[in-house]
């Protein structure tokens, strides 16, 4: 059975179903946003990243580029939707700033629509094109593919270590260091879901080592991102240390919260530079951004501290089991 092909088909079916219903809605962009079109595109990106070095890299790299355009557009729209929701009721912010946030959100929505139109998503041509290319590929046999995927996953773990090794400590930039670290960690989780049941979390220590207990919060343990389901029965699974994966999940969430705080501060700071403010407005923005530099520094320091503890606990080193 061509499991690789079937994994792509599952995500393409999810994408197609959402787009088809969105095309009949009053607000197609809002529909795809609320119905989480971004997730199956994330899954496609993850699969392309996994398979691009196994065979026919040109096909997967092209698909990756096309999927990323949509996912990035949806991500930007999400950023401004959340920002608008969080700050729209903040009377302390000048009306002109809140208006700019709304305009940014509307522009991001328009960009999503344009990307879906220009990429042949709205007209339904892109998915059949993908399917045609994928069906003609010579997919690896199950055992061979499993071993190749293990090596790719191991390589992705090494990339995290390499990134951290090259980054300044403490971190110096929210986007380049904190956000980028979270991206690299998050792919390790996305790959597991994209492989559609081929990854299993396995208990390796009872009781859980003391150093890992801080990661096992109720929120992490209950997170749907840490529950794997699959459509097929495999001869042999890829096994990850369950406690280590929970620790990875905690790190992704914690770094993500810091990243969001930092990017929100930065967005307001940037908007304040582009609009004309009266005296009261300047005072309001100054109050909102009080200690801007020190707040950013605190975010960077915390992200650095969490990363150092994460490294010291050897979470990734022991994640992938034999």
Image: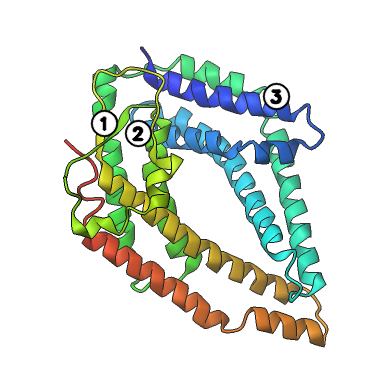
Of residues 309 and 64, the one nearer the viewer is 309
Crowding at label 2, few (<14), some or many (≥20) Cα neighbours within 10 Å?
A: some
Mark 2 or 1, nearer chain start = 2
Q: What residue sits right under mark 3 in the picture?
A: 20
Q: Position of residue 14 (x, y in %)?
A: 57, 26
Q: Marks 2 and 1, how far apart in space?
A: 18 Å
Q: Marks 3 and 1, how far apart in space?
A: 34 Å
Mark 3 or 1, nearer chain start = 3
Of residues 234 and 92, the one nearer the viewer is 92
Q: Marks 2 and 3, how far apart in space?
A: 32 Å
Q: Residue at x 52, y 27 (%)?
A: 11
Q: What residue sits right under mark 2 in the picture?
A: 53
Crowding at label 3, few (<14), some or many (≥20) Cα neighbours within 10 Å?
A: some
Disc 2 on helix, strand or loop? loop
- Per the rendering, the mark at residue 5 is none
The quarter of the picture where residue 70 lies is top right
- Per the rendering, the mark at residue 238 is 1
Disc 3 on helix, strand or loop? helix
Of residues 224 and 298, the one nearer the viewer is 224
């Amino acid at each position: 059975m061509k499991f690789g092909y079937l994994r792509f088909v599952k995500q393409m079916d999810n994408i197609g179903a959402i787009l088809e219903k969105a095309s009949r809605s009053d607000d197609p962009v809002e529909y795809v946003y609320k119905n989480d079109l971004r997730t199956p595109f994330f899954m496609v990106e993850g699969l392309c990243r996994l398979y691009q070095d196994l065979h026919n890299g040109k096909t997967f790299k092209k698909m990756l580029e096309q999927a990323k355009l949509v996912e990035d557009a949806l991500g930007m729209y999400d950023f401004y939707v959340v920002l608008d929701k969080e700050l729209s009721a903040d009377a302390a912010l000048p009306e002109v700033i809140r208006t700019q946030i709304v305009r940014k959100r509307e522009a991001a929505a328009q960009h999503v629509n344009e990307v879906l139109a220009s990429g042949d998503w709205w007209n339904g041509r892109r998915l059949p094109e993908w399917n045609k290319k994928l069906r003609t590929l010579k997919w690896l046999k199950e055992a061979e593919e499993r071993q190749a995927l293990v090596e790719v996953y191991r390589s992705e773990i090494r990339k995290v270590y390499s990134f951290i090794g090259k980054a300044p400590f403490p971190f110096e930039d929210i986007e380049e260091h904190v956000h980028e670290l979270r991206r690299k960690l998050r792919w390790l989780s996305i790959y597991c879901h994209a492989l559609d049941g081929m990854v299993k979390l396995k208990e390796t220590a009872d009781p859980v080592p003391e150093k890992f207990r801080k990661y096992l919060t109720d929120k992490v343990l209950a997170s749907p991102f840490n529950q794997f389901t699959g459509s097929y029965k495999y001869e042999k699974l890829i096994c990850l240390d369950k406690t280590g994966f929970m620790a990875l999940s905690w790190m992704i969430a914690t770094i993500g919260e810091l990243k969001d705080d930092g990017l929100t501060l930065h967005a307001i700071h940037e908007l304040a530079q582009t609009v004309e403010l009266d005296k009261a407005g300047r005072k309001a923005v100054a109050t909102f951004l009080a200690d801007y530099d020190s707040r950013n520094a605190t975010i960077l320091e915390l992200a650095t501290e969490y990363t150092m503890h994460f490294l010291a606990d050897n979470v990734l080193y022991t994640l992938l089991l034999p």
